[in-house]
């Protein structure tokens, strides 16, 4: 079985500051990794995904994440946030041999202040 | 092109009543998923359709939940009778067929917020 842990339920940050949203996972098999974002009153939108290859993955809106297999982590980073980045962010995994469902973390609410 | 559409956006019903949620996937997407988020918790998988067939329904909570996808197009999720613990946001997602087992992006709808009182 797989599980995803997002330790920070809320992350407040000032505009133009860097941010890191943490994600750790547990799995007995290899997994694909994803970050989704939910802006207010919208559905979930894919930010980025790691399938294979380079462990540093770049996504939309200036976000990037680094896969660390030894630490089973997939932290999301942005060097300088904007007010418009205020949203809820979800880390998710999908087992390689069962790509038909996502296992999500509990989400991290990012609040960017002016 | 229209995205994944869910109806209604909000529903408030009394315990014991029946509610039917609808999801219209993106045209051509064979895969359709239902997920649920109970307040403050993680988004949990409910089930997966491939066209009109249920591929995996291991996440369905109990037999009060019935999902259908007639003709492989839109899907409905019926809760009968609804209980208080069924409250939450129900998300639908769709994706095209998987080429060579590589996952493609799942596109999510805005969700239906269900409140059982």
Image (cartoon, coloured by chain):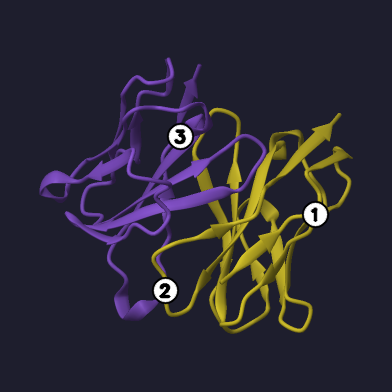
Q: Quadrant of residue A114?
A: top right
Q: Secondary structure at mark 3?
A: loop
Is B107 placed left or right of A72 in the picture?
Answer: left
Instruction: Single out the mark in the foreground, 3 or 2.
Output: 2
Number of the label disc, if any, that sits on residue A98: 2
Which chain, by letter, is purple? B
What subunit carries mark 2? A
Spatial separation of the CA atoms under disc 3 and disc 2: 25 Å
Q: Are marks 3 and 2 on the same chain?
A: no
Read off the residue under disc 3. Answer: B110
Q: Nearer the viewer, residue A9 or B13?
A: B13
In primary-sequence order, the first of circles 2 and 1 is: 1
Tag 2–tag 1 contact (CB < 8 Å): no
Tag 3–tag 1 contact (CB < 8 Å): no
Q: Position of residue A38 (x, y in %)?
A: 59, 40
Q: Position of residue B116 (x, y in %)?
A: 48, 21
Apparent colour of chain A: yellow
């Amino acid at each position: 079985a797989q599980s995803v842990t997002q330790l920070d339920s809320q992350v407040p940050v000032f505009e133009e500051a860097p941010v890191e949203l943490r994600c750790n996972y547990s799995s007995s098999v290899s997994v694909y990794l994803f970050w989704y974002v939910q802006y207010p009153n919208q559905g979930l939108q894919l930010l980025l995904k790691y399938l294979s290859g380079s462990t540093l993955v770049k996504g939309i809106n200036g976000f990037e994440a680094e896969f660390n297999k030894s630490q089973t982590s997939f932290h999301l980073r942005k060097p300088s946030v904007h007010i418009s980045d205020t949203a809820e962010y979800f880390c998710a995994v999908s087992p390689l041999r069962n790509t038909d469902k996502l296992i999500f973390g509990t989400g991290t609410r990012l609040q960017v202040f002016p | 092109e229209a995205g994944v559409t869910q109806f209604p956006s909000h529903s408030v019903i009394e315990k014991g009543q029946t509610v039917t949620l609808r999801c219209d996937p993106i045209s051509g997407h064979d895969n359709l998923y239902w997920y649920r988020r109970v307040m403050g918790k993680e988004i949990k998988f409910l089930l997966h359709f491939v066209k009109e067939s249920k591929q995996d329904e291991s996440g369905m909570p109990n037999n009060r939940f019935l999902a259908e996808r007639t003709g492989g197009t839109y899907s409905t999720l019926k809760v009968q009778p609804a209980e208080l613990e069924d409250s939450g946001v129900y998300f639908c997602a769709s994706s095209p067929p998987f080429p060579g087992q590589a996952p493609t992006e799942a596109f999510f709808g805005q969700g239906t917020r269900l409140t059982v009182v």
